Amino acid sequence: MKNTRGIIFDFDGVLVDTEWAIYQSWVRLYEREGQHISIETYAPCLGAGYSHWDPARHLESLTGKHYDWERETPARQAQIEADLAEQGLMPGARELLDWCRDAGIGLTVASSSSRRWVGGWLERLGIINRFKGVFTRTDGYPVKPNPALFLAAQHCLGLPCEQCLVVEDSENGTISAANAGIPCVAVPNRMTAASDFSRAACRLPNLTALRERLEQQLVG
């Protein structure tokens, strides 16, 4: 972290607390069908989307039913967006972005979510111009823990890996950063607090703590 000149942010659960609402949409659907989905069961989706484990297929295996996902998915998405209608940035995020701007630290976003989702949020929150680049799965990159998203973001920053820092909230994300050879700080949330962050350089409680750590390193 001492020589950090560029930061690569994950999006969901790092800049905006979206993951809880997404998980709750599945909880409600499962409950409607008389089933239960725990955070532990859902955990493989965090940071990776549904490429490795699909809650839709899991529900079908539990119930023995085939669902009309062309109807269910838009309804669930509308529910998520309604739940998040008043959602802002994570605590400490705007202050961290401001500090990075003033310190001359380059910023990018690398997410396993879609460009429509990530870009839409960054536009809505008025921060998309803070980032040199935004990289998502719908730009053709394989999802985490594959390192491709982080390597694309690092290339955009034009910095060697050791001068970049990944900020992640998920185990899949920290593995992806390690696979890319980029130092990573884990900042868990209520969805990921019990995850294994052994591949991260350190674990911090929130983005305010990260800003303070970066300030100390800059002074030191």
Image (tube, grey):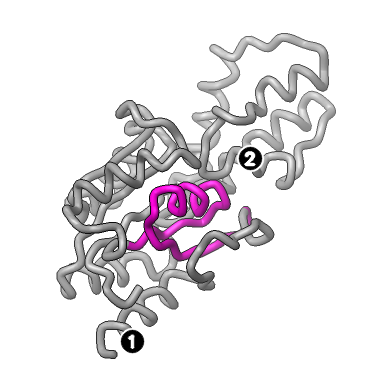
What residue is pinned by disc 2?
A: 44
- Magenta-highlighted residues: 165-191
Q: Split into 4 quadrants, where in the image is the C terminus?
A: bottom left
Residue nearer the viewer, 132 or 59 = 132
Q: Residue at x 50, y 71 (%)?
A: 202
Residue 56 is inside the magenta segment? no
Residue nearer the viewer, 134 or 185 = 185
Task: Assess disc 1: are there few (<14), some (14-19) or many (≥20) residues with their C-alpha within 10 Å of its C-alpha.
Answer: few
Q: Residue at x 29, y 47 (%)?
A: 122
Q: Residue at x 72, y 9 (%)?
A: 66
Q: Split into 4 quadrants, where in the image is the N terminus?
A: bottom left
Q: Secondary structure at mark 1?
A: helix
Q: Is residue 219 left or right of residue 165?
A: left
How far from the left and from the top, in percent, is residue 67?
A: 68, 12
Q: How many marks?
A: 2
How far from the left and from the top, in percent, is residue 209?
A: 44, 77
Residue 169 is inside the magenta segment? yes
Splitting the image into 4 quarters, where does residue 59 fall? top right
Q: Which mark is residue 216?
A: 1
How far from the left and from the top, in percent, is residue 164?
A: 29, 61
Q: Which mark is residue 193?
A: none
Q: Amino acid at mark 2?
A: Pro
Q: CA distance from mark 1 to mark 2?
A: 35 Å
Q: Amino acid at mark 1?
A: Gln
| Residue 168 to residue 117: above or below | below
